[in-house]
Image: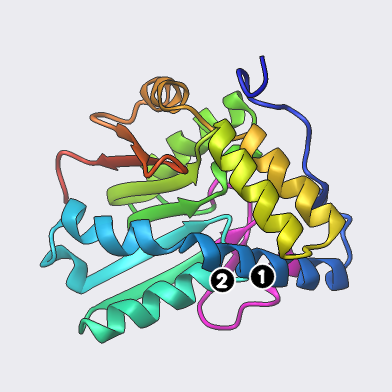
Amino acid sequence: MFLGRRATQAEYFDSPQRSLAEIVNFYESLNRANRFFVFAEPFQRLLPKFLGEGACRSLSILDLGAGDGTLAKVLTAWAVKRGWTWRFTDLDVNFRALRLNSACPNVAGSALALPFRDASFDVVIASQMTHHLTDAQAQQHLREAWRVARVAIFLSDLHRNAGLYAMLWLLLCLGRFPHSFRLDGLLSVRRGWRVDELQRLADQAGLIGARIRLYYGARVLLQARKRTVN
């Protein structure tokens, strides 16, 4: 059945062989699409509710699969308007993507083996990153994110459904996005998650009390908070 199971095909821009020019064009297209979907909104709306506004006044945050660092830039500016200090570290496996980001510390590395000590950051986040992994890799990614988080992890990803697929197809066609980006965008939905799938992986990864929820039909959110904070 269409969209019944996650696609396993790798996306074009998952390859480390893409040139810098291709990477630049990719992130220009991605940022255009993300503005339409207001990609930072779940973090802005729900993180303060999840952690409490008092806890949000000063946070160290690790962004996994950060790419060109756009999410950190948007959230940092948003936090500043509220008098909060959010200090980001951006991690991505693609060093060419990180070269586009000069706003915060960058670390080239894998989300499957994070080069940080336990509880190195208050919060670990990821936006539209987890679907790039296989189920087994996603489980390891969640385990690592949980390990280096001191307080909580908060992940936002795509919900695999026909409505989102159709809406994205229309946007990509009308917006005249590059062909390779259009193919990757639709494949991303096919590689997206259902709530029960991500819940199973979170449980297997040992995320105690992890809550997976559907968000406006287009996203699946994962929230998990540690019971004790040292």
Residue positioned 47% across, 43% down in the render: 218
Horizontal side of residue 31 vs 184, given as left or right: left
Q: Mark 2 belongs to which amino acid?
A: Gly
Provide the residue designation for mark 2: 69
Residue 61 x/y as whole percent: 37, 63
Q: Secondary structure at mark 1?
A: helix
Residue 177 x/y as whole percent: 77, 63
Q: Mark 1 belongs to which amino acid?
A: Leu
49 lies above or below 175? above
Using the rendered view, name the quadrant where residue 160 is placed: top right
Residue positioned 84% across, 71% down in the render: 20
Can you say which quadrant of the picture contains the N terminus? top right
Using the rendered view, name the quadrant where residue 211 is placed: top left
Kindly identify which numbered label has been placed on residue 98: 1
Count of numbered circles in the view: 2
32 lies above or below 18? below
Between 70 and 165, which is closer to the camera in this rendering?
165
Kindly identify which numbered label has been placed on residue 147: none
Residue positioned 41% across, 46% down in the render: 155
Between 52 and 218, which is closer to the camera in this rendering?
218
The magenta stretch spans which residues? 91-114
Q: Are marks 1 and 2 in contact (CB under 8 Å)?
A: yes
Horizontal side of residue 229 vs 193, given as left or right: left
